[in-house]
Amino acid sequence: MSADVTKADQTPGDRVPDDRTGGVQGSAQHGPPVGGNPTSSGGLAGFLGGPLGRNAGLVVALVLLIIVGIITAGDRFASPENALTILRLGSVIGVVSVGMTFVISGGGIDLSVGAIVALSSVWATTVATQTLAADFHWIVMVFAALLVGGACGLINGVLIAYGRIAPFIATLAMLAAARGLAEIIAKRRTQIIRDRDFITFFGGSVLGIPVLVILFAVVAVVGWVLLNRTTFGRRTLAIGGNPEAARLAGIRVQRQTMYLYILLGIACGIAAVMIMARTTTGTSTHGTLYELDAIAAVVIGGTLLSGGRGTIVGTVLGVLIFTTLTNVFTLNNLDTSTQAVAKGAIIVAAVLLQQRVSRTRSG
Amino acid sequence: MTNVVKRFPGVVALGGVDLDVQPGEVHCLLGQNGAGKSTLIKVLAGVHEPNEGTIEWAGEPVTLHHPQAAMDLGVATMYQELDLVEGLTVAENIFLGHEPTRFGFSQRTAARREAAALLARLGHPEISPSVEVGTLSAASCQIVSMARALSRDARLIIMDEPSAVLDAGEVDQLFRVIREVTDHGVAVVYISHRLEEIREIGDRVTVLKDGKTVATGLDAKTTPTQELIRLMTGRSIEYVFPPKAEIADAKPVLRVEGLSRVGEFSSVSFDVRPGEVVGLAGLVGSGRSEIVETIFGARKATTGTVTVDGRAVRPGSVPAAVSAGIGLCPEERKSQALVLGASLAANISLASLTRFSRAGVLDRDGENTSAEELLESLDVRPRGIHRESRTLSGGNQQKVVLARWLLRGCRVLLLDEPTRGVDVGARSEIYALIRRLTDEGVAVVVVSSEIPEVLGLSNRVLVLADRTVRHEGPADELDEHAVLDIILKGDAA
């Protein structure tokens, strides 16, 4: 039978007796009235429907990982230094994932983020850029990275919004082209950053917290406000949820779509600056497979891959889960292949859990 | 031969429903939205399992765990939201799930031949079995859906509002097919909001209200309309159109001049004064929806102009139309109007976001307060601004779409099928709301397939046929027959 019917099969109507007690209004075809109403709390469904509950599964997963880490690696894991290491490792992909949350909530996808990070890092570390930076200020390198990232995003956005190319295809093309261009510019060589001030600034710490982590935190907070508290965020969710309805409500869907890719491109530029600081290099191999890591973090975070619902908090938790996992594996000297298997399992488990939660929330 | 009995009290959606369907009869289900009709048919189709009660098929109790189990028994269902796969051909859709095969390979030629035979039997030999369903009109899709039901040698066919997307001629065609299958002993469960259809095709009627059977086995031909409506609503009114307002001789708010779109409609001109309702009557495919969507800028006019308060609106731009003060409640509520996964508040404020923002940051309290007030004043049920819009019934969803434009404050409101899929009670509320808007000086354009509705609501009516305006005149001077006459004869009255 059709998808229509399969979906109807999942409506909570036939499960009603075990999920809810009393207060029975509405009907099976309309789903339970609990869905997402913060005032109607109480009971498991109410808890899971609340803003905290939406991320409860992720928090549980993270706590479990931490427990595993403590058991297997003891103090080497449970130290402030290691906590900062995890955060620092997660900050680069974290910034990309926050940007990715916007594109996915808006009903799109971007496969080119890793390539954009590479191209931005290369462009910002060419001899020409570095000479200019030496004459003027290292901020030139930062602007170069942001500009290149934003420009790539603009190209993606224009192709998708106005050229009506499927996001998957347009960004797949960008993935190939941007990394290729990065290789051409860098001649496949690693470009060393000579500006010590740049390294000291981004590699340093403020009040004991690495600047990279602060940057990630700032991006996450700005992203949260932008998605949840602004017209920009509301429009994003509207075009992701139902582009036709958004269009007929007077929203400029194409323009908004384009903005989302530019935003993500700039996030990639920021990530490029961060990875440049961490490795003191710019190279065309930076950001390899970032697209998969970012999409995985966003999706296990609870953002709908079909658009219309997005959560920055979930994305941040998703990033932390993957980074902590890597850390635990590294501390236990386990190889990356095992790690990849565990990652795959986590993605599946997390998505299964999300589905259960969203099913109790709405039909 | 068959005797389907089912009852299962004690559940949320259906609290005790009895229904028995005899072979060869057309059994109509009546009830307001949310009365449980859709749930009931899903139970019959094996999508939902009843928590209590029994289903008997030909005297034997059966349990339907799965849609396939129902199909194996001979129950075929035509859902309201058509469940065809757009990318597949007509023949592939008809035989989806039971393709003729030999040694595991599908028999495409055989499938096409049988599909063609079925379509011919349905009176639509012009639908080619090898075209993709996505390219067909809504009416043709309905026929394909019907052919699919027949292809399974169904003994009971359930039709959920099959006529909603059909025009008068196509409905007649549908009825002919229904009569043909019932003559062969097939039973039909027919759901419709249109009483006149039930009169014409139905044998017996079961009325549902709040998930319960309030009457069953009524004679479809003789039970008085008043009685049926009283059973459905607890009230005894059919269409209650509010009295029409006197239109002052003011300058028109909306003026449409020579509007054309190649292949869709040509040289449409009319104007609407403040407080006036202008209706567009015509059959499905006459260009009604295309006209209002073009006025709204959702389609770009080939020629012609739209002016609001004397100022021209930039063609082909929805934002321009919205800022000129035009609002549109589109034909397809779910796909064109609502963000179903978003809250009611977010749906209501969607066209007025800038009003609730300061430097781009949303004033959520202000947004929620306004939404709350509107839901209250429109009596949207169940209340609750954080509720997802998908959880509401059709009538309440329509009110939410109207609330969007009330909040925005429109000079011109375009209503495309404002009461499609809306039950009788909510209908009269929507009519009253339209009247309230016109009292405030809003100019309204109404499109509806139901001619009595266009006539009852409008001050003036434009009758469309062959993609152009055939007649324009006061609604009082027309009745349903006159409108149909104009449409069918194709000459100006």
Image (tube, rainbow, N blue to C red):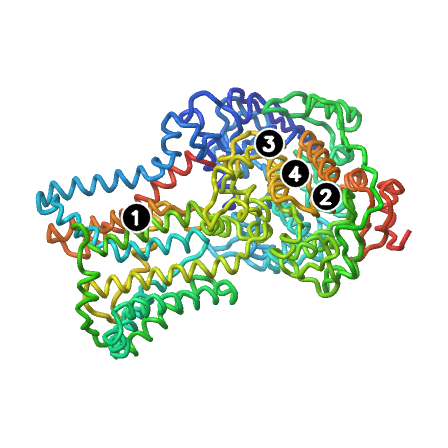
Q: Which mark is residue B380?
A: 3
Q: Do the residues at pointers 2 and 1 share their chain?
A: no
The span from disc 2 to disc 1 (Cα, nearest Å) is 48 Å
Per the image, the residue denoted by label 1 is A316
Per the image, the residue denoted by label 4 is B421
Badge 4 vs badge 1, beta-carbon distance below 8 Å: no
Q: Which mark is residue A226?
A: none
* SS state under label 2: loop
The residue located at (69%, 45%) in the rendering is: B415
Q: Tell me which label, 3 or 2, sits earlier in the chain.
A: 3
Pointer 3 local density, CA inside 10 Å: few below 14, some 14–19, many at least 20: many
Chain holding disc 2: B
Residue type at tag 3: Val
The residue located at (64%, 44%) in the rendering is: B409
Most foreground residue, A191 or A161: A191
Residue type at tag 1: Val
* SS state under label 1: helix
Q: Tell me which label, 4 or 3, sits earlier in the chain.
A: 3
* SS state under label 4: loop
Per the image, the residue denoted by label 2 is B442
Residue type at tag 4: Gly
Look at discs 3 and 2 and give the one toward the viewer: 2
The residue located at (52%, 28%) in the rendering is: B62
The reply to whether residue B118 is in sight is: no
* SS state under label 3: loop
